[in-house]
Image (cartoon, helix red, strand yellow):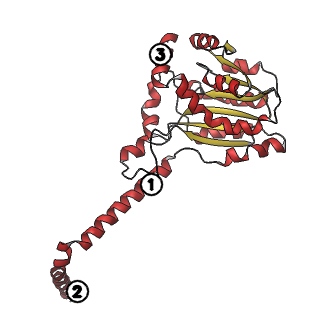
C-alpha cells in the first residue's frame, strides 16, 4: 500500500492530531502516580505514527522515542522534533536493554500484526520494562457490534479483532503483575441523560476502543501508587447497555399497563369483563363434568 494513501486514510478516519492527543490523556493517572518514583523516566512508543503520544510524554517530562515501519509517518514525526526510527517494532524491542524503560506503548498496532508477533511483543515488553513499569496497548473494541462486524474492516491493514479478555490474558500469561481493561471513546451516549434508547444504540454506543494497561511487578511503593488508577472503571460495556435497554423496555411496558388500567374505557368495561369471566368459569366447570 502506498504510504501517502495510508496517511490520508488515518487523517480521515482516525481523527486529527489534536483530537487523538486529547483522547490519550486518559492514561496520565497511571503515569502521574509513578513519576516521582522513576528519576529520568524513558519511554518507547511502538507504531508511533504522527507522534501524538510522543508529544504528551514530552509534555510530562518523559524522555520518549518512537518507532514506525511507515517512512511517511516517521518523516512527519521527525518534522515535529520527535526522536523516531524507521524499524520493525519487535526487532526494535529486542535490541533494547533489560529493565531499561518506564513505559512501552502501542496504540492501534496490536490489530495490525499476527498473534504470534503480538505474543513476542508482550514478552519482550516485560523484559525491557523496569520493575513497576507500564505496558499500554490500545485497539478497536469488538464488543461494539458495529466496530466488530463492520468498521474494523474499514482499515485494509487490520488482521483480526482482539476481544478484551484475550488481549488482557497475554500480559497475565507472560508475568505482568497487574492488568486493567480500559474501554474508551464512547461516541456520544450518556446513561444518565439518555431516556429514549434504541436498539441501534445497543449496537453502536459501546466504547469504540479499549486498552490494556499492565504493570510489571516492582517495589511496594510502585505497586501501591497505581492502585487508584487500576481500581477505577472505564467506558461502557455491552452488558451494561443491554441491561439498560431491557430496563427501559420493562419500564415502558409498565407505563402502558398503568395507563390502560387507569383509562376511562377500562373502567366502564369492567362489568362486561366480570360477566365474561363468570361465563368462562361456568363453561370450564361444565366441561370438567
Q: Residue at x 58, y 18 (%)?
A: 50
Disc on res. 244: 1
Question: Element under label 1?
Answer: helix
CB atoms at circles 3 and 2 under 8 Å apart?
Answer: no
Q: Position of residue 172 (x, y in %)?
A: 70, 41
Q: CA distance from mark 3 to mark 2?
A: 79 Å
Badge nearest the viewer, 2 or 1: 1
> First in sequence: mark 3 or mark 2?
3
Question: Element under label 2?
Answer: helix
Question: In the image shown, does 91 or 11 lie closer to the viewer?
Answer: 11
Crowd around label 3: few <14 · some 14–19 · many ≥20 (10 Å): few
Looking at the image, residue 221 sits to the left or right of residue 51; the answer is right
Crowd around label 1: few <14 · some 14–19 · many ≥20 (10 Å): some
Q: Position of residue 118 (x, y in %)?
A: 64, 28
Disc on res. 8: 3
Q: CA distance from mark 1 to mark 3?
A: 38 Å
- Residue, far bottom: 289
Looking at the image, residue 25 sits to the left or right of residue 222; the answer is left
Q: Residue at x 63, y 32 (%)?
A: 137
CB atoms at circles 2 and 1 under 8 Å apart?
Answer: no
* Quadrant of the drawing holding the C terminus: bottom left
Q: CA distance from mark 2 to mark 1?
A: 46 Å
Instruction: Provide the residue designation for mark 2.
Output: 288
Using the image, determine if residue 54 lies above or below residue 35.
above
Badge nearest the viewer, 3 or 2: 3
CB atoms at circles 1 and 3 under 8 Å apart?
Answer: no
> First in sequence: mark 2 or mark 1?
1
Question: In the image shown, does 135 or 197 lie closer to the viewer?
Answer: 197
Question: In the image shown, does 185 or 149 lie closer to the viewer?
Answer: 185
Amino acid at each position: 500500500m502506498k504510504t501517502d494513501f495510508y496517511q490520508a486514510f488515518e487523517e480521515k478516519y482516525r481523527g486529527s492530531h489534536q483530537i487523538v492527543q486529547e483522547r490519550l490523556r486518559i492514561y496520565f493517572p497511571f503515569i502521574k502516580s509513578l513519576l516521582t518514583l522513576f528519576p529520568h523516566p524513558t519511554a518507547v512508543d511502538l507504531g508511533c505514527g504522527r507522534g501524538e503520544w510522543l508529544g504528551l510524554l514530552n509534555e510530562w517530562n518523559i524522555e520518549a522515542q518512537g518507532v514506525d515501519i511507515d517512512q511517511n509517518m516517521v518523516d512527519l514525526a521527525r518534522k515535529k522534533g520527535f526522536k523516531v526510527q524507521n524499524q520493525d517494532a519487535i526487532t526494535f524491542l529486542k535490541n533494547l536493554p533489560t529493565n531499561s524503560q518506564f513505559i512501552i506503548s502501542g496504540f492501534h498496532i496490536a490489530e495490525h500484526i499476527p498473534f504470534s508477533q503480538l505474543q513476542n511483543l508482550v514478552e519482550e515488553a516485560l523484559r525491557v520494562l523496569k520493575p513497576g513499569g507500564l505496558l499500554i496497548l490500545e485497539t478497536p473494541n469488538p464488543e461494539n457490534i458495529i466496530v466488530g462486524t463492520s468498521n474494523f474492516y474499514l482499515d485494509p491493514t487490520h488482521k483480526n479483532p482482539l476481544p478484551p479478555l484475550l488481549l488482557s490474558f497475554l500480559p497475565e500469561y507472560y508475568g505482568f503483575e497487574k492488568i486493567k481493561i480500559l474501554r474508551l471513546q464512547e461516541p456520544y451516549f450518556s446513561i444518565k441523560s439518555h431516556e429514549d434508547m434504541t436498539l441501534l444504540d445497543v449496537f453502536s454506543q459501546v466504547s469504540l476502543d479499549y486498552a490494556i494497561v499492565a504493570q510489571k511487578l516492582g517495589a511496594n511503593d510502585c505497586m501501591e501508587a497505581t492502585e487508584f488508577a487500576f481500581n477505577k472503571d472505564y467506558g461502557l460495556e455491552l452488558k451494561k447497555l443491554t441491561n439498560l435497554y431491557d430496563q427501559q423496555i420493562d419500564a415502558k411496558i409498565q407505563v402502558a399497563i398503568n395507563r390502560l388500567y387507569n383509562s376511562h374505557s377500562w373502567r366502564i368495561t369492567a362489568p362486561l369483563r366480570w360477566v365474561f369471566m363468570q361465563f368462562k368459569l361456568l363453561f370450564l366447570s361444565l366441561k370438567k363434568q
